[in-house]
Amino acid sequence: MSFLLPNPARQLPSGVGFLGLLSYGRPPKAGVYFFAAHTTNFIRGVQTAKALLASGAVGELLMIEAVHTDWAGPQKFTGWKQRKDISGGHLYHHMHEADLICQLAGLPVSVYANGKNLVHHGEGCGDEEDAIFLNMELSGGGFASLTIGSAFHLGDHFVKLQGKTGGILLDFKNSVVRLENDRGEKLYSMQENEAEDEERRNGYRKHKADAGKGFGKPGMKTSSWMSTIFYKELKCFNDIIRTGNTAPEYEPLLDGSAALNCVKVLDGARESMALRLPVRLEE
């Protein structure tokens, strides 16, 4: 038996507990594989950034700044992403950056969050917060921040990694990774090749009215860069099932720890918004 759970792992049918799925465990005798499909892990640029960090290219990681913002106008039909009772709202369905923060720096010590629905009211709008701001204290003593929402006409999509001796910019909007340190600057592809990088850049231009957010519809063709990520993800899962072997970097996806840490951050942020206080996150 195998589970490949699409992101975010928080979104499960009524009555199916996330921790219940994790309780299946991963002993070979159980014959059960759980795989939380966090697609960001399979983006070439993200893998490049992880390799650069591991090589000491920017020294000790001190701070992470993540931004995933855009503008979304009223829709003809209100979808599941705009309803908090189904998706949890922006806080949960834009979980990729929170997941990346956890994978790069471990589970944060605490999170403090603010957010509200500023402009999306009435017909064609959901009930989710359209502006959310998270501040996190990292276990290593540094900090991380995450800004997400759909109330931003000047939207952006990036993750900045600040180290002691340099920095790394994952610029998703321009589909490039930039390394800066005392040896100068170096650029890397975000996707598998230049054609996919250009396709991703064009996606933001095409949907400029929604700051790069393309609402999917039945029959819509998936972009090549996203198809590549899905292929790499599914191949990884298939190889695990067939061989029983897992590359170390994908173990957190298989044992559920990556998804669990991400959910802890998001649930903590939701609690913090309600309490208007910082919330400590337990290991």
Image (cartoon, rainbow, N blue to C red):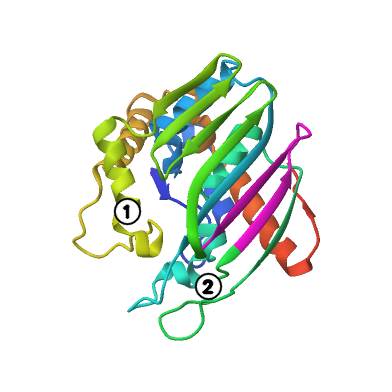
> Is 141 contained in the magenta span?
yes
Task: Name the kind of residue labelled 2 in the image.
Answer: Asp
Q: Is residue 60 above or below residue 230?
A: above
Image coordinates for residue 214, horizontal then vertical, percent? 33, 60
Q: Residue 72 is drawn in which quadrant?
A: bottom left
Q: Is 46 left or right of 193, judged from the image as shown?
A: right
- The magenta stretch spans which residues? 132-149
Image coordinates for residue 103, horizontal then vertical, percent? 58, 35
- List the residue tagged with mark 1: 205
Closer to the eye: label 2 or 1? 1
Between 272 and 49, the one nearer to me in the picture:
49
The residue shown at (32%, 44%) is 200
- Dot 1 falls on a residue whose secondary structure is helix
Query: Which quadrant: the N terminus?
Result: top left
Q: Is residue 94 visible?
A: no
Between 115 and 86, the one nearer to me in the picture:
115
Q: Is residue 102 above or below residue 119?
A: above
Q: Is residue 185 visible?
A: yes
The residue shown at (30%, 62%) is 216
Query: Which quadrant: the C terminus?
Result: top right
Task: Name the kind of residue labelled 1 in the image.
Answer: Arg
Considering the whole magenta stretch, tell me its main secondary structure: strand
Residue 85 is labelled as 2
Crowd band around label 2 with a 10 angstrom C-alpha radius: few (<14), some (14–19), many (20+) = few
**Mark 2 or 1, nearer chain start:** 2
